[in-house]
């Protein structure tokens, strides 16, 4: 059995924080060969300037306590990748800056059970990130991703919408996109966001305002993706099978 936790970086347990940095380094530096400013060549962890402040980290742990998935969420009212690193992807004056729009980045996971197919898929962690963002008042999430990852998201069932200007100079391989967090989006995935949120263990005292769901969402009686209440026990989200790791900026 395994579980999912969420919290600010400095409030995550030290061992999980260490594992998270190592997991991200293996995915984004070693496997995808990203060159990230501030990450030296001999580093064993991957962090950047967006990991502090109001950023919330979602971490999936395997049955033996190892990090097997991650995502980070940050409100667009503060520093974020889209505005501070990739502003040319969006038309001037159209950069999101609202407490109801959160940015999702550094998504990667492998070996998570997919209740819809009975197999494993790293994408199974994504609905939890959506539910967590929704609980913080987000009505949609935005992100910067490659064209291949965008195709993967759409195959998974996400209603991904381009918000950018197309291919920006020097950024032809990535696009800016958004995902609505309304009931229809979760229905397409066969998920109940309240049940998903209740399966996440929140750590620390400095998260955004107490998570809550909009009135249009109601707890489901049962959901194959998640079970149990927050902190009531482990959640089966990872196993030891091998699977391709999916990643987003």
Image (tube, rainbow, N blue to C red):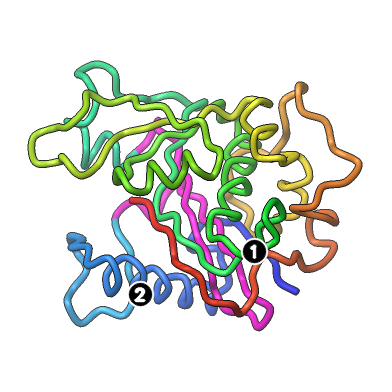
Sooner in the amino-acid sequence: mark 1 or mark 2 = 2
Identify which residue is drawn at 77% across, 22% down. 215
Left or right? Give the position of 30 relative to 125. left
The residue wearing badge 2 is 26
**Total label count?**
2
- Please tell me in which quadrant of the rendered image residue 211 appears: top right
Identify which residue is drawn at 15% across, 40% down. 172
Left or right? Give the position of 144 relative to 8. left
Q: Residues within 10 Å of mark 1 (few under 14, many from 20)?
A: few
Which numbered mark, 1 or 2, is in the foreground of this view?
A: 1
The residue wearing badge 1 is 119
Highlighted range, magenta: 49-78
Callout 1: SS: loop
Identify which residue, 116 or 186, lies in the foreground. Answer: 116
Quick check: is 229 in the magenta stretch? no
x and y, in percent, of residue 34 in the image: 22, 63
Identify which residue is drawn at 65% across, 37% down. 135
């Amino acid at each position: 059995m395994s579980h999912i936790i969420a919290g600010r970086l400095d409030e995550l347990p030290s061992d999980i924080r260490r594992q998270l940095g190592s997991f991200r380094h293996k995915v984004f530096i070693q496997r995808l060969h990203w060159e990230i400013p501030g990450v030296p060549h001999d580093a064993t962890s991957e962090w950047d300037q967006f990991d502090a402040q109001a950023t919330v980290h979602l971490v999936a742990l395997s049955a033996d306590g190892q990090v097997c998935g991650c995502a980070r969420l940050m409100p667009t009212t503060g520093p974020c990748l889209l505005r501070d690193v990739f502003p040319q992807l969006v038309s001037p004056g159209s950069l999101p800056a609202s407490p109801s729009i959160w940015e999702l980045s550094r998504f990667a996971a492998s070996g998570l059970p997919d209740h819809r197919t009975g197999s494993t898929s790293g994408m199974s962690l994504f609905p939890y990130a959506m539910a967590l963002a929704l609980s913080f008042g987000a009505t949609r999430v935005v992100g910067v991703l490659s064209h291949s990852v965008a195709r993967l998201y759409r195959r998974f069932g996400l209603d991904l919408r381009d918000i950018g200007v197309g291919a920006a100079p020097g950024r032809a391989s990535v696009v800016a996109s958004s995902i609505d967090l309304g009931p229809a989006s979760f229905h397409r995935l066969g998920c109940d966001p309240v049940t998903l949120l209740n399966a996440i263990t929140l750590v620390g005292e400095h998260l955004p305002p107490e998570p809550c769901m909009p009135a249009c969402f109601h707890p489901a009686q049962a959901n194959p993706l998640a079970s149990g209440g927050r902190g009531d026990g482990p959640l089966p989200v990872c196993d030891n099978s091998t699977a391709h790791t999916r990643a987003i900026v």
